Image (cartoon, helix red, strand yellow):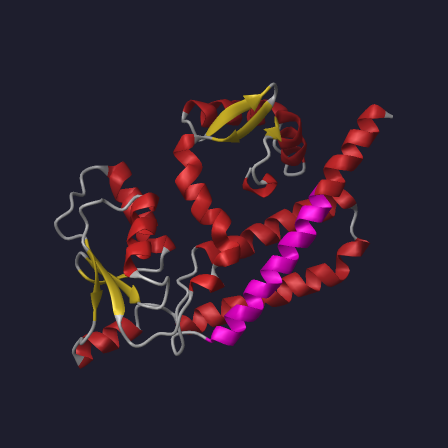
Amino acid sequence: MLAVGDKPMSARDAILAGSLFGISENSLRVTLARLSAASLIEVAGRGSYRLGPAATDLAGEVASWRQAEARLRPWTGGYIAVHCGALGRSDRVALRQRERALQMLGFQELERGLHIRPDNIEAHIDVVCQRLYKLGLDRDAPVFLASGFDSAREARIASLWDGQALTQTYRQLRLQMETWLANAHRLALDTAARESLLLGGKAIHQLVFDPLLPEPFVDAAERHAFIQCVQRFDDAGRAIWNHFFTSIALEMTS
């Protein structure tokens, strides 16, 4: 539903989209009912749905992937830290939300209960705090700036993220998307719609959960090229899906 922006999505369109992936109409309607019961979606009119209150914060974070690079600023060698050592772990739902929040903003555990990331995102740490809290981090978890680690910890910090693997992923996904775009005109419309959603979803997932590390952790130029390609691919995918839904509507009225 994020793909349609602020517009509601009709159950008919959801069923049509599901059919491309072998999902039956009955299964789709059961899923819609369950999502509605969990307040993840809500009825927006006869036969249409939009994101519900329980999904708003997470959906907003996911939908902001196009602004990822705008959040970056030069790294001066410091870190943002979150201390979770005093937080409970018995509430599994709260624990999952906490771990997801930290993961989505690129934090890794340096020592038990202490999670850090380079201080190269957002203009101020307060913005990082609010994003973490909206994503599910406990409000009483301290978030602070950290620097001056000893050489042993600095070495461990450098190994928390596999920057080489990230850079390779940027390059591989970009090449896959560029190759697909160059050959998309040869595909049947339903095939193009299905494949664009699968590959585009994979690329956007990578970007949503990308730690947005500074150099020398990753190759920033390779990441920039990847992000630019994701945006072009998303634009193309949206156009393909709009064409798909329009063509189905014309067939139904003819």
Please indicate, yes or no, whether residue 171 appears anywhere in the rendered image: no
Q: Is residue 252 left or right of residue 131?
A: right
Considering only vertical position in the picture, is 74 above or below 129? below
Magenta run includes residue 223: yes
Q: Position of residue 158 (x, y in %)?
A: 30, 74
* Closer to us: 29 or 53: 53
Give the residue at x 38% y 70%: 162
Q: Position of residue 71 (x, y in %)?
A: 43, 62
Q: Position of residue 91 (x, y in %)?
A: 21, 37
Q: Position of residue 141 (x, y in %)?
A: 19, 50
Considering only vertical position in the picture, is 53 above or below 182? above
Considering only vertical position in the picture, is 170 above or below 105? below
Q: Is residue 193 left or right of residue 39?
A: right
Magenta run includes residue 220: yes
* Closer to us: 229 or 126: 126
Quarter of the image with the N terminus is top right
Give the residue at x 36% y 63%: 123
User: Which span is picked out in magenta?
Assistant: 219-241
Q: Is residue 196 left or right of residue 160?
A: right
**Residue extending furthest top?**
46
Q: How many marks?
A: 0
Instruction: Give the quadrant of residue 26.
Output: top right
Q: Is residue 44 left or right of residue 180?
A: left
Give the residue at x 63% y 67%: 175
Main secondary structure type of the part rendered in magenta = helix
Quarter of the image with the C terminus is top right
Instruction: Give the quadrant of residue 27.
Output: top right
**Residue extending furthest left?**
86
